[in-house]
Image (cartoon, rainbow, N blue to C red):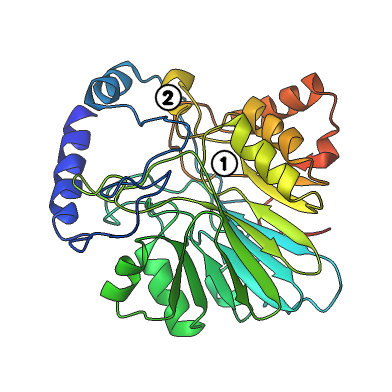
Amino acid sequence: MFRFLFFLSIIVLLVSCGIFKKRYSGDVSDHFNGKKFVNINGGQVNGATELFKFMRTRNPTKWIKEYETYSRDIPIENNYTDSIKLIFINHSTFLIQLDTLNILTDPIWSERCSPVQWAGPKRNRPPGVTFNSLPNIDVVLISHNHYDHLDKNTILGLQKEHTPQFIVPLGVSHFFKRLGIQNVIEIDWDEEIKFKSLKIKGTPAVHFSSRGAFDQNKTLWCGYLIKGSKNIYFAGDTGYDENIFKKIGNENPSLDLSIIPIGAYKPNWFMSLIHTNPNEAVKIHVDLKTKQSVATHFGTFALADEGQGEAGKDLKIALGTYKISNEKFLIPEEGIFYEF
């Protein structure tokens, strides 16, 4: 195991030498110190000492491949109703259909979320929708630059087949422009842009960014508010911060749907700075005062020590603790349409 991690670290180190040579530059703010982006709650990612402790003491539960799960290969039509149509594809990838527009979040169809496709975390389920079954994609939202949320192969495929509008956090457009993709807009926290009939706004999150050894926090991470005939919140990848989520809820009192991460949370002492556990996910649901929540960031890649299916079980326990019905915070199945 350690030999594999050593070689994977070397790969990441070599790959990172060619990543983000051009650094983001902008005005100093409460989340950018002139050199790096920071969490507004002061939280910092664990350093090398904690990382080595995590690697040394890991006790992950083995996952198995579940390729008998449903994978939709029927072409998807546009949504011409007044409702939100939502389909869970995998990990943090959703197809959202709102006001005749098709939106993808953090798309990944690759076999691995890694700098290379012969090493790194491998998927345990197929995508719930085949790539060729997608309708015309209008806009793609990227929450940050980690490999499980920003997948080069998928981005190139989307550009070739759909040429969507990519919306990314500050600094991430350099990745796209290195691929020759110009149809990309950067967005800051609390910045709102108009895209056709929608308003899309960046929101704060508690996380970090990097694609290699030398670019940590050189680009921003964020969630998104999607405002149309109905209002949707996509949290992206985040740790828990009561002030952040209560503020989003108070400023957006008519949230129809929130997509909230529940996975990659064990051991909690290491993961809590960057990922919400299921109990904290329910707290976010409460803080937002949202009408409906849907779970994300679970079931595809084994990125932490919790067992396969454990996130869903822990979510149901947390919902019981808060006396919230399971229907109000769904654990979606891949490839199935939900309508809100």
Quadrant showing the N terminus: top left
Tell whether label 2 touches label 1 (CB within 8 Å).
Answer: no
In front here: 232 or 316? 232
In front here: 58 or 209? 209
Q: Mark on residue 298?
A: 1
What is the three-letter code of the residue carrying label 2? Pro
- Could you tell whether 228 is left or right of 212 in the image? right
- Report which quarter residue 226 is drawn in: bottom right
Q: Mark on residue 19?
A: none
Identify which residue is drawn at 86% across, 33% down. 325
Residue 149, given in percent of the width and then of the height, sits at 45, 54
- Could you tell whether 318 is left or right of 311 in the image? right
The secondary structure type at the circle numbered 2 is: loop
- Marks 1/2: CA distance? 15 Å
Q: What is the crowding at mark 1: few (fewer than 14 residues within 10 Å), some, or many (at least 20)?
A: many
Identify which residue is drawn at 48% across, 83% down. 163
Identify which residue is drawn at 50% across, 62% down. 107
Q: Nearer the viewer, mark 1 or mark 2?
A: 1
The secondary structure type at the circle numbered 1 is: loop
Q: Mark on residue 60?
A: 2
Can residue 141 be seen here?
Answer: yes
Q: What is the crowding at mark 2: few (fewer than 14 residues within 10 Å), some, or many (at least 20)?
A: some
- Could you tell whether 194 is left or right of 176 in the image? right
Quadrant showing the C terminus: bottom right
What is the three-letter code of the residue carrying label 1? Phe
Residue 104, given in percent of the width and then of the height, sits at 58, 66
Residue 67, given in percent of the width and then of the height, sits at 55, 51
> Which of disc 2 and disc 1 is earlier in sequence?
2
In front here: 298 or 233? 233
Residue 222, given in percent of the width and then of the height, sits at 50, 51
Can residue 331 be seen here?
Answer: no
Identify which residue is drawn at 51% across, 77% down. 165
